Image (cartoon, rainbow, N blue to C red):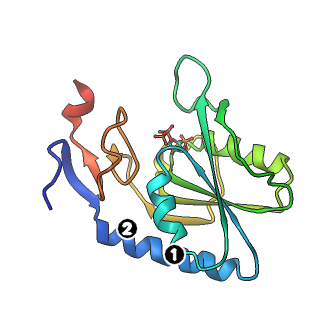
Amino acid sequence: MELHRDIERILLSEEQIKKRVAEIGQRITLDYAGKRPLLVSVLKGSVVFMADLMREIKVDCDIDFMSVSSYGNGQKSSGVVRILKDLDHDIAGRDIIVVEDILDSGLTLSYILEMLKNRGAASIRLCTLLDKPDRRRVSVAVDYSGFTVPDEFVVGYGLDYGETYRNLPYIGILKPEVYTK
Ligand code: PRP
């Protein structure tokens, strides 16, 4: 497969991702035997992971989506989150799995997890494909993690830079000249 011209190198191939997503799906299937989890995807980066992961989960489940944006000076991950699209489901008493593409500073995620907890969910777990611990500013408990990644500019498989690259089937490292110019 031809590498996108803006990609320096592939960090995680399609095959590696597929294998790991299947493993996580099997783990969730075992952990939620007899339950009906509600998978919550935070738009937009997580949609690709969500679409693949849900097909590896063999218990009945529901899916839902929310869209948020950070408040304040257009600053990403300020920690205060505005809800642009809320969940369709009432989550009281539900077993929630928040499905994320990447855990970075943890600010957005800790806010969302706290908010869901306050709505009376029976349980809340976090499933993230990528974990970038070097960037963490608040600690967040991760229940299912696909890969720990270095502090590099990663795109693809849902992750973007300026809304581009979400459709790449692999996770690649962006060439620095793309984001420094
Ligand atoms: C990414 C990711 C998480 C958040 C994680 O979303 O999907 O929601 O950032 O960052 P944090 O750990 O620093 O809080 P982004 O804001 O890039 O939006 P997108 O998914 O629409 O690309």
* Whether residue 76 can be seen here: yes
> Badge 1 is on which residue?
56
Residue 157 sits in which quadrant? bottom left
Observer-nearest residue: 97 or 79? Answer: 97
Q: Give amino acid for label 1.
A: Glu
Q: Is residue 145 left or right of residue 31?
A: left
Observer-nearest residue: 147 or 89? Answer: 89
Cβ–Cβ under 8 Å for marks 2 and 1: no
x then y, percent, for residue 107: 62, 39
Q: Give amino acid for label 2.
A: Ile
| Residue 17 tag number | 2
* Whether residue 131 can be seen here: no
Residue 138 sits in which quadrant? top right
Disc 1 on helix, strand or loop? loop
Q: Is residue 107 left or right of residue 21?
A: right
x then y, percent, for residue 21: 46, 70
Disc 2 on helix, strand or loop? helix
